Image (spheres, helix red, strand yellow):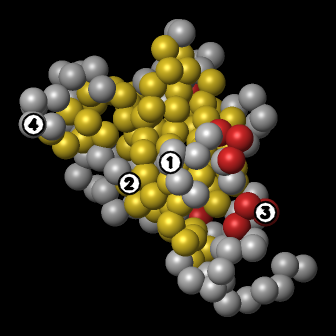
Amino acid sequence: MSRRDDRDEDHEGCCERRDDDRPRLRRRRVEMVRGDTWVHAFQVISDVATGLLYTARLPNQMPPGAVPLNLTGAKVWLTVKRFASDGDGLALAQLTTTAGSVVLTTPLSGVATATMQPGPTLGFPDMDTELAYDVQVLLAGATTTVELGTLVVRPDVTSATS
């Protein structure tokens, strides 16, 4: 397992502006190595000016005008698919707070950690494989996508696991 394989190229904040000046989530790009355990830690925050919910990377470096979202009582999903258009039944992995694969590490501060076991990536080819993923939060009856991105699975060199 290697936490450093979870790289994020988006260090400039959560959103970009649409033509109508409304904010939208900026896509993230993270990496892992085939057959490793992927640990994805994040903090759900809210933009005070727009009300947009999104994630910040850890360690906490919230942009100005953002506050942590209290996740107490929330349900969180992290879903990984070959194609975003695939139904949830075709997901390679769906990590949830209900199943214990997403843990609300510090709920008052909006911090959660999702852990995907090696199984879903073991049969991947000896080349980079790009997958779609998102993080959704259900809180107070509202479901919100707080992170969208591409998970790049890089081939490993060592095949030994024990």
Residue assigned mark 4: 19
Q: CA distance from mark 2 to mark 4?
A: 20 Å
State the residue position of label 1.
84
Side of 142 where 39 appears, left or right = right
Q: Are marks 1 and 4 in contact (CB under 8 Å)?
A: no
Q: Is residue 72 left or right of residue 54?
A: right
Callout 2 amino acid: Arg
As measured in the structure, the alpha-carbon distance from the residue carrying label 1 to the one carrying label 2 is 14 Å
Picture disc at residue 28: 2
Q: Using the numbered discs, state the Cα–Cα distance from disc 1 to disc 3 in whole angstroms.
A: 20 Å
Q: Residue at x 18, y 22 (%)?
A: 49
Q: Are marks 2 and 4 in contact (CB under 8 Å)?
A: no
Residue 8, given in percent of the width and then of the height, sits at 40, 61
Q: Nearer the viewer, residue 98 or 4?
A: 98
Q: Secondary structure under badge 3?
A: helix
Above or below — where is 61 with respect to 103?
Answer: below
* Residue 156 falls left or right of residue 40: right
Crowd rating for badge 4 (residues with CA inside 10 Å; few <14, some 14–19, many 20+): few
Category of crowding for the residue at label 1, using alpha-carbon neighbours closer than 10 angstroms: few (below 14), some (14–19), many (at least 20)? some
Judged from this view, the residue extending furthest toward the right is 162
Quick one: SS at disc 1? loop
In this figure, which residue is indicated by the disc labeled 3? 119
Among the two numbered marks 1 and 4 on one chain, the one whose residue lies closer to the N terminus: 4
Please report whichever mark, 1 or 2, sits nearer to the chain's N-terminal start.
2
- The span from disc 1 to disc 4 (Cα, nearest Å) is 24 Å
Name the residue: 45% across, 25% down: 144
Q: Is residue 40 visible?
A: no
The image quadrant where one finds the C terminus is: bottom right
